[in-house]
Amino acid sequence: MPAADYSFTIEKGTAFVISFEYKNDSNIPINLTNWCVRLRWIEDQATPTIRTFITNTRNSEYEFIIEPLDGRIILRIPASQTAQYNFGSALYDMELQEPNDLYSGGGKKVFRILQGTISLISRNVPGTDAFQCDPDTQDDCGTCVS
């Protein structure tokens, strides 16, 4: 079965969260216990950049996790990272790796479930600084002060 086509948008300088649910033909979530997911995209720049996101990863650049019993895959990218993105669009693939071998000695079964285009929406006010405000450092009018 070919990968489904799904396109989405990221707004530069804002937190990005997307969730996918992997279900069977009867619309029942597939148990993803011990599975791995990889999402990769290639950006449309003069020197293309390939970004790779692997599940069960949490760091300052992204969080990519699986909620296995719900068949849910969640990617979170903080505003500080999306503020650094400088592409107009990117093409992506999402692949799953089952915990079982395809056959003895054949390695894990890997298949692509999604593909599509990611569009980046630029900000009206240019810059790569992400909005950051600590409520403890606000004055009485709610304005961030330094």
Image (spheres, rainbow, N blue to C red):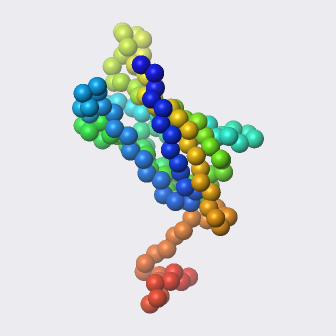
User: Most extreme residue toward the bottom, as rendered?
Assistant: 140
Which of 102/114 is in front? 114
The quarter of the image holding the C terminus is bottom right
Estimate the x, y position of residue 99 in percent, counting from the top left.
34, 24
| Residue shown at the point (35%, 30%) measured from the top left | 35
Estimate the x, y position of residue 133 in percent, counting from the top left.
49, 74
Q: Is residue 103 visible?
A: yes
The answer to whether residue 78 is left or right of residue 30 is right
The quarter of the image holding the N terminus is top left
Quarter of the view holding residue 128: bottom right
| Residue shown at the point (43%, 78%) measured from the top left | 135
Quarter of the view holding residue 89: top right
Q: Is residue 41 visible?
A: no
Quarter of the view holding residue 36: top left
| Residue shown at the point (43%, 51%) measured from the top left | 17
User: Most extreme residue toward the right, as rendered?
Assistant: 46
| Residue shown at the point (46%, 75%) measured from the top left | 134
Which of 74/102 is in front? 74
Classify 67 as above or below 83. Answer: above
Which of 65/12 is in front? 12
The answer to whether residue 18 is left or right of residue 51 is left
Classify 137 as above or below 80. Answer: below
Estimate the x, y position of residue 76 in percent, counting from the top left.
44, 50
The answer to whether residue 92 is left or right of residue 26 is right
Estimate the x, y position of residue 49 in percent, counting from the top left.
65, 40
